[in-house]
Amino acid sequence: MVDGDRRRAVVFDFGGVLITTIANQIGNVAADLGVQPDVLHRVLLGPRGSTPDHPWHRAERGDLAVASIQAGLDPWAEQAGIELRGDEIDRLLAPGEYTIVEPMVRRVEALRSAGVRTGLLTNTFAEFRTTMQRDLDFSLFDAVIESFAVGARKPEPAIYAATAAALGVAHSDIVYLDDFDQNLEPALTLGWTTVLVTDPNDALAELDEVLGRGARTAT
């Protein structure tokens, strides 16, 4: 990174950024149930933002075991008028249902080689850590911030504060890539620069623009 550029850290989300989104699995499950994917997304993964009592959100904070998520979904399904079969969470988390987004991983490597601090910031479960470490080299990151370990999940402010502290940089020095706009809003409020990821190549091009020509690295 060029001298004088104050953006000294780039932080990446995991699902939907470094790996393909689980929205694909939700679509498949929704088709089998005959419901709209966005409706099922709210039932299985919780409403937009964060709630204290949705089982998926509780598991991401480390308050609930993953094995207990399915049993806690009935009130949410009933409210949405959906009858679940009981295997929805297992299907979402089944191995082999996502792929690594290689251009994103190569960019992490290139940034780290260029002396830019890198971070991984993800809502995830304690039970999923082994799988993440199998599929992604954690040594690529100066800091790995997992919601279950922090006890807070995006978009709750505490996890963003924990990220800046772990990286040892000011909020204004962070660029953050995430595929959910609601997760970017608190970061923007704190002074982070954000990139919404819908297409990996477009997001990387935007990252290049954010960092400036002197900070560009090969993909």
Image: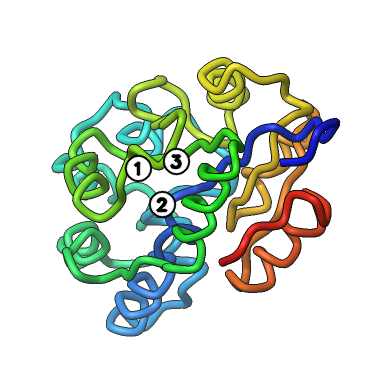
Mark toward the start of the polypeptide (2 vs 3) = 2
- The mark lying in front, picked from 3 and 1, is 3
Circles 2 and 1, Cβ within 8 Å, touching? The answer is yes
- Find numbered disc 3 in the image and state the secondary structure of the residue it sits on: strand
**Disc 2 marks which residue?**
45
Q: Quadrant of residue 135?
A: bottom left
Q: CA distance from mark 2 to mark 1?
A: 6 Å
Side of 201 relative to 151 (left or right): right
Mark toward the start of the polypeptide (2 vs 1) = 2
**Disc 3 marks which residue?**
122
Q: Is residue 31 above or below residue 72?
A: below
Q: Is residue 133 above or below residue 98?
A: above
**Disc 1 marks which residue?**
56
Q: Position of residue 7 (x, y in %)?
A: 75, 35
Q: Quadrant of residue 86?
A: bottom left
Side of 205 relative to 85 (left or right): right
Residue pictured at 45% horizontal, 28% vertical: 143
Q: Is residue 19 above or below residue 9?
A: below
Residue pictured at 20% horizontal, 70% vertical: 96
Q: CA distance from mark 3 to mark 1?
A: 14 Å
Residue pictured at 74% horizontal, 49% vertical: 215
Amino acid marked by disc 3: Thr
Residue pictured at 33% horizontal, 72% vertical: 25
- Find numbered disc 2 in the image and state the secondary structure of the residue it sits on: helix
